[in-house]
Image: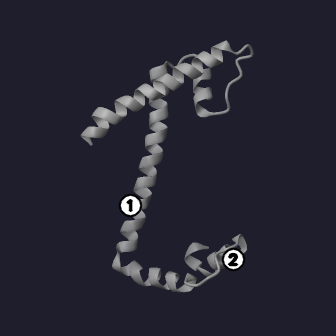
Amino acid sequence: YRRVTETLLPGLRALVLELIAKRREELSEEEDNMVAADLLGVLLSSKVLSDEDILAVLFDVVIAGSDTTASTITAALFLLYQPQQKQLLESILDEVHGADLTTIESINDVRASLPVLS
């Protein structure tokens, strides 16, 4: 944790601030000031957000996405570890063992045969 907060985050902040400044410069040099079709372009088009504000929004998006993924995986593993789920998991594995999973159609057939995943 300490290494991340003392080493990685300051370097990442500096990199993102550099990218924000570079994109802001590119936008100011363009004659028609077209907004790029991405989050950074939209944030830069707002005249009220500072580079620090934009940095905070970008970090929130990245951290929220990684936290959500980590939380979902943790919850799924916790549920799969529960004894009452063991029989269900074993039956699903038995059902798909040896199944043809080489085409989208065959994967959809397997999925349809599993009521839990329908």
Up/down of 9 relative to 108, above or below: above
Visible in this render: residue 46?
Answer: no
Q: Earlier in the sequence, mark 1 or mark 2?
A: 1
**Residue sitting at 36 percent across and 67 percent down?**
78
**Residue sitting at 59 percent across and 79 percent down?**
114
Residue extending furthest toward the right: 32
Residue 71 occupies quadrant: bottom left
Up/down of 117 relative to 95, above or below: above
Residue 74 occupies quadrant: bottom left
Q: Which residue is mark 2?
A: 106
Q: Which residue is mark 1?
A: 74
On-image quarter of the N terminus: top left
* Secondary-structure class at tag 1: helix
Q: Which mark is residue 23?
A: none
**Residue sitting at 61 percent across and 73 percent down?**
118
36 relative to 61 in the view: left or right: right
Specify the amino acid type for callout 1.
Answer: Thr
50 relative to 102 in the view: left or right: left
